[in-house]
Amino acid sequence: MPEPAVTLSGGVVVSSTRREEVSTRIRRALLTGELRPGQRIKEVHLAEALGVSRPTLRESLQQLVHEGALVQVPYKGIHVAQPTAEELRDVAEVRMPLETMAALRLARDPDGPAMDGVREALRVHLAAIESGDALQAHVTHIGLHEAIWDMADSPTLRKIWPLVGSQVHIALTVDQAVRHDPERDAMLHRRLVRVIEEGDEATIAAEVEEHIRRSVDEVLRRLS
Amino acid sequence: MPEPAVTLSGGVVVSSTRREEVSTRIRRALLTGELRPGQRIKEVHLAEALGVSRPTLRESLQQLVHEGALVQVPYKGIHVAQPTAEELRDVAEVRMPLETMAALRLARDPDGPAMDGVREALRVHLAAIESGDALQAHVTHIGLHEAIWDMADSPTLRKIWPLVGSQVHIALTVDQAVRHDPERDAMLHRRLVRVIEEGDEATIAAEVEEHIRRSVDEVLRRLS
DNA sequence: ATGGCGTAGATCGTCAGTCAATCTGCATGA
DNA sequence: TCATGCAGATTGACTGACGATCTACGCCAT
């Protein structure tokens, strides 16, 4: 009789294995800021908090380490990643061609279920902005970009997303607290989706690149 | 008193943790064909063969599963990945812009240590071809492409490489047995490196894309 | 007083043994 | 013949423990 699943933050997760469940909960904790960049993670502590054994927790952590969300130094411990400005630029550079590819794939069927998924993610994000909940806006912002990668229906892009997404998320976490211009954020993402819908390849590529460049530039400015 | 490290294939691996050691050994076993596409992996068996406990082995497997080299189905088991034609095409599509990016970065300093590394990898590959050892030629072929990704000095590309490289490797494993034209293989890779050295961006992009396209096409033809 | 060094505590890495959950294959009966 | 159910095999997960390694504190020599 498993007791009801309880996350670090109180939500519920369904998954066929505990390991996946734990990974999901930790990812969520990262998203909500319950685990902050640079924060040290102690195995026994976290295992207890999550109600799993250390071996199981370690399998989960292994996965997140591999995604780059966590950093592991043998015998020293695990801490939440804290990318340098250089690393953020690097991620952005790789992200551009891939997110462009995803957008171009989506544009091939602007009325299909894939774009519906993206539009839905946009709608949710706009609603979150509207509500004034900065945390929710952050989560749905990542969610929109994830949807673009996910709905492009490429297994390889799906596997790469966590590597990129975790860094994007951490980068934006810094930004989140001082989130200054929700209107502009809403406008930019509406435009991004509209450009994809319209389907002109060159315009899409330019828009995606510009979107990413602008985003990383803002974060880097705030970091310095 | 740890006894001397013995791989599945008899080599020696140095690493600060057993987990990394085991991951490396399994990767090597995949490269050498000791573990073949589709093959089932039994935990107790493999743990015993590698001389580690099940939890430690499971942490290693977790990592390889995440890289896509292995596939895990809850309660059914783990087997070596066996990508479909569709998946191979998908990997190739993602691989193109990234390997192009890596090549372009290398081209910025054609006389630097990075390109030295690539040239060295090419030299090793050519030697392997010369020697007539098909297995070694396969390993060094992957090694050359890995060098291109690695020497580009992008942490993000380095993190993505295993995801792509494992699929490339598996795809070429199919090919390996019937490796038919070593001369052509040598010529193509010599040319690839030369084009990077010469540094014309458009030519590099075209050459890398052509190289990848040709490679995946050949594999797919042989698959059908 | 200050700086290098060694020891103690904390934490991680790893192991062995055990039990529960789930899948697979075979035998059984309608 | 086909569905059903049981038994063996394998994975998923836990407990408890021990050695390996890092970190911090206190001690000693200068």
Image (cartoon, coloured by chain):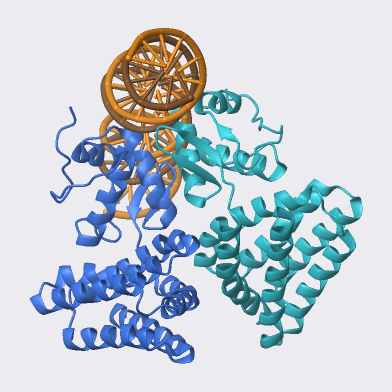
Chain colours: A blue, B cyan, C orange, D brown
User: Which residue is nearer to you in this view: A159 or C9?
Assistant: A159
**Residue B19, image x, y percentages:** 50, 38
Q: Position of residue A178 (x, y in %)?
A: 18, 78
Which quarter of the image is occupied by the C terminus of chain B? bottom right
Q: Is residue A32 above or below residue C29?
A: below
Left or right: residue A120 versus residue B182 is left
Side of A4 relative to B29 (left or right): left
Q: Nearer the viewer, residue B113 or B119?
A: B119
Work out which residue is located at the far left of the displayed protein and give it. Answer: A131
Q: Nearer the viewer, residue A192 or A182?
A: A192
Q: Residue at x 63, y 43 (%)?
A: B37
Residue found at x 47% / y 34%: B77
Q: Residue at x 71, y 85 (%)?
A: B203
Residue B153 in sight here: no
Across and down, in percent, residue B97 comes to 57, 75
Instruction: Answer with the quarter of the image where residue A133 lies.
Output: bottom left
Q: Quadrant of residue B123?
A: bottom right
Q: Can you say whether B15 is above or below C3 in the image?
A: above
Residue at horizontal 46 percent and vertical 41 percent from the top: B72
Give the camera-side residue of A93 and B15.
A93
